Amino acid sequence: MTVLVTGSRGRVASTLLGLLDAAGVEARAGSKNPADLSPPPGVDTVHCDLGDPATFDTALKGVDSVFLYAEAAHLGTFADRARAAGVEHIALLSSSSVLAPDAAENPIAASHLAAERALSAAAASGAFEATHLQPGAFATNALQWAGALKEGHVPALPYPHAHSDPIHERDVAEAAFAALTEPRLRGSSYLLTGPESLDFTEQLAILAEVTGRPARYTTVTPKEWKKSVAPFIPERFADALLSYWSSHDGRPTPLTNTIEDLTGHPARTFTTWAEDHAEEFRPA
């Protein structure tokens, strides 16, 4: 079996490449900039730009399964080319946001939902099977605080008690590995969560304990936060984040046991993630 892993510069994809290689599964690392990749020795790289359909055929040649990032713009074309190449299975890295009632109107969820729908429509012909992996909040979202904490500053939070279900990127990669290598798991949608619902203050407290450094915060109004991020977060995405945090303010996130069902072990805690990434929060 040969697996094409798209977006191989990403944390999930790069971890998945290592898992496939260690298991003796032939993997191909795809990226818009393959020269920038550092895959395991013996893993080939290939130019696969999900925004450029001209790169699809070469990347898909001889491939049996694909780990696919949710880039919706040309997903229908990608699915057509995958079908023509004889691909049997595509595992899509989607998002739990697609399950929200307003997913089609939410700028964060809409692209994932469009990708799921396009892939499902293509798979309906029976040419290949499609699996949707729907993780909740990545624990790596906490890295948004790393710069401030390194410099001794305090993150500004509009909703300090907004809950999420931080999931370790390795757990997502291991779930993808299971879906790609165990035929019985193909063709379903899997809601993936971390093992605990934590608000932002609880996550910061864990970071402080693990790193041995203060991890305080300051509370700002939504308007103040939106203005502070305007240079790098488009307004509609900022509004979507504020709406999400508001709806989860003081409300624990429902959890699943899907990681354990797929991988055979419980999902890693946020403390474990913080220990794995502690140096990213400490001054150089």
Image (cartoon, rainbow, N blue to C red):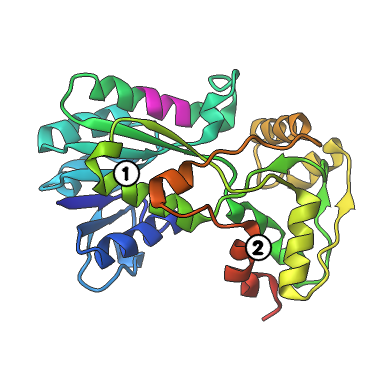
Residue 271: which disc? 2
Identity of the amino acid at label 2? Thr
- On the rendered image, what quadrant is the C terminus found in? bottom right
**Does the magenta stretch mainly form a helix, a strand or a loop?**
helix
Disc 1 crowd rating (10 Å Cα; few below 14, some 14-19, many 20+) is many
| Observer able to see residue 281 | yes
Q: Nearer the viewer, residue 233 or 152?
A: 152
Look at the picture and state if 244 lies above or below 172.
Answer: above
Residue 276 picture location, percent across and down: 57, 69
Ranked by sequence position, the earlier of labels 2 and 1 is 1
> Does 255 sit left or right of 86 as displayed?
right
Look at the picture and state if 31 lies above or below 282.
Answer: above
> Does 283 sit left or right of 157 as displayed?
left
Q: Please, which residue is most extreme toward the bottom here?
A: 284
Identity of the amino acid at label 1? Ala
Residue 156 picture location, percent across and down: 83, 52
Residue 179: which disc? 1
Looking at the rendered structure, the secondary structure element under dot 2 is helix
Q: Is residue 192 magenta?
A: no
Look at the picture and state if 165 lies above or below 244.
Answer: below
Residue 72 picture location, percent across and down: 39, 31
Looking at the rendered structure, the secondary structure element under dot 1 is helix
Q: What range of the chain is rendered magenta?
A: 112-117
Identify the residue at image location x=65%, y=37%: 234
Q: Quadrant of residue 14?
A: bottom left
Look at the picture and state if 28 lies above or below 222.
Answer: below
Identify the residue at image location x=21%, y=42%: 56
